Amino acid sequence: MADDPTERTLLLLALLHSRSGWTVEELAGRLGVSGRTVRRDADRLRRLGYGVVARPGPGSSYRLVPGVALPPLLFDPDEISCVVAGLRLIEGAMPGDDAPARALAKLDRVLPRALRRRAAATMLAVTVPEIDDPGINARAVGVVADAVAQGRSVRFTYRDDHDRPTTRLLIPHRHVHRRGRWYLIGYDVDRDDWRVFRLDRVHDLEVVATGDEAPDFPDASAGRWLATDFGRRSTHAPRGAGERS
């Protein structure tokens, strides 16, 4: 139950936005309040300019008129716990990058007081051991993500186990985080095959438009493909497996 009327009203708005209609009984159960309080909070939303439509009578319900825009960062307590825990996990996986910490600080500045308390509690409760610095940063992850979404290729310099550089042109498919490392899976255009690269060995990464298209990926799950010796084994690959450049 949200004790603060402002927080409770925002939660009601989020619930109404999540589907086409709610009965008063359903809303009261989700918010942990009485039906009378639900009606009072719905009236408050109307006074704030939100189009809340009521259907009176037995099984009375509420809905939002189409096109109602929500205020930014409208989370409930469980959602903010998920967001903070996720950022903490990324923070542990990218110890050399301050992007997760910056995101957490921005959340703290804009959240309502009650949600700030939940966010702070989650920060305190979730501890993620840092891995050895893998040289990964949020920019590299973002560049690859943009390329995947836009159907473009990436060009980069890759350094192998012996620090020998090669230039690669790749149609990226997925990132996979496995056993403390980030891997980049994609179709190597010049080698005409699916390959796996440790992301900490990728340098000078840039998105390029080549018009190349990759064949269908050989597995429905990139993580399973990586864990099963690139689809050749039915059980997990031995520790240390996972690079195929």
Image: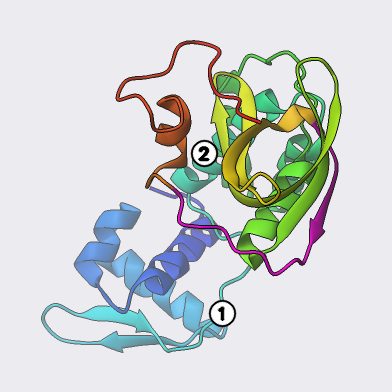
Say which mark, if any, is on residue 69: 1
Identify which residue is drawn at 79% across, 57% down: 207
Q: Where is residue 123 in the image (x, y as percent from the top left)?
A: 62, 28
Q: Where is residue 46 in the image (x, y as percent from the top left)?
A: 48, 83
Q: Quarter-wise, where is residue 132 in the image?
A: top right
Residue extending farthest left:
58
Residue stretch in magenta = 202-217
Say which mark, if any, is on residue 231: none
Crowd rating for badge 2 (residues with CA inside 10 Å; few <14, some 14–19, many 20+)? many
Front-lying residue, 60 or 162: 162
Q: In this view, does 53 lie above or below 164?
A: below
Inspect the image, locate mark 1, and give the three-letter code of the amino acid beneath it.
Ala
Mark 2 to mark 1: distance in Å?
Answer: 24 Å
Q: Position of residue 153 (x, y in %)?
A: 71, 58
Q: In this view, does 203 lie to the left or right of 111?
A: right
Q: Is residue 22 left or right of residue 132?
A: left
Q: Is residue 64 above or below residue 170?
A: below
Identify which residue is drawn at 36% across, 88% down: 53
Q: Where is residue 107 in the image (x, y as percent from the top left)?
A: 70, 47
Say which mark, if any, is on residue 81: 2
